[in-house]
Amino acid sequence: MQTWRRPLFSHRRPNEKQPRMPQPILSTSRLRFDKWRHEDADLLFAIHSSPLIQRGYPFPTSAWTRNAVLERLRRYMGEHERQGLTKWKLSLLDGTFVGRAGWSPWGHQIEIGYAVLPEFQGKGIAMEAAFALMEWAQARRSEDLVGFCLVGNYRSKSILERIGMKYEYDRVISEAMHAFYRLSR
């Protein structure tokens, strides 16, 4: 299993200034949401090559080849440029990569999604990200807000319910049964 690891040593001298991080799209007391860049492909691959993360998706880890990840990265970058939303890169405030979270178009609605690297799960990061995303969408968008997860993904169901979405029905998406949630506006 290939995982992304933070470098142990920095090539900077001790008193050399850290490069400035760009202004985030959104931030919380612990998290920052940033636009993806081409050089982030390995980070996105780290998420989707993790069997622990892929348990929450209807397709196998093997579906996430490097080419598939590059295509997804281009899609995220294009969505942001065209529509001002996507599943953004999710990091701690110090720049440590923890996953992805954001919104994607879903018909005439927008769909929330999040994935957190296994070593950062169980720390409230997905919940904090989801609450921040709801506030962001309610202040800037007029579409209904939707979310869905595999019917057995009780952690995601709990998050969707706690951020105010209401369960509507189970539905097949990508050949797997999902619980579908909505916040009508």
Image (cartoon, rainbow, N blue to C red):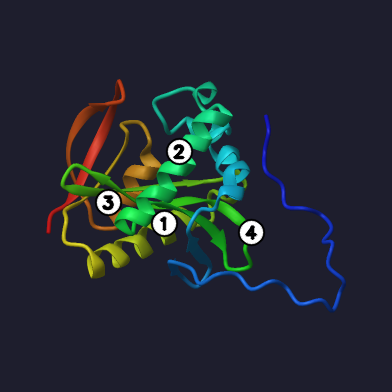
Q: Earlier in the sequence, mark 3 or mark 4?
A: 4
Residue 96 circle label = 4
Residue 67 lies left or right of residue 1; in this view the side is: left
Q: Position of residue 25 (x, y in %)?
A: 43, 66
Residue 161 circle label = 3
Residue 72 circle label = 2
The reply to whether the C-beta atoms of the residues labelled 4 and 2 are less than 8 Å apart is: no
Q: Is residue 80 above or below residue 139?
A: above
The reply to whether the C-beta atoms of the residues labelled 3 and 2 are less than 8 Å apart is: no
Q: Position of residue 16 (x, y in %)?
A: 82, 76
Q: Mark 1 belongs to which amino acid?
A: Met
Tell me which residue sits at (50%, 65%) in the image. 32
Residue 113 lies left or right of residue 36; in this view the side is: left
Packing grade of label 1 (10 A; few <14, some 14-19, many >=20) is some
Quadrant assignment, res 170: top left
Mark 1 or 2: in front is 2
The reply to whether the C-beta atoms of the residues labelled 3 and 4 are less than 8 Å apart is: no
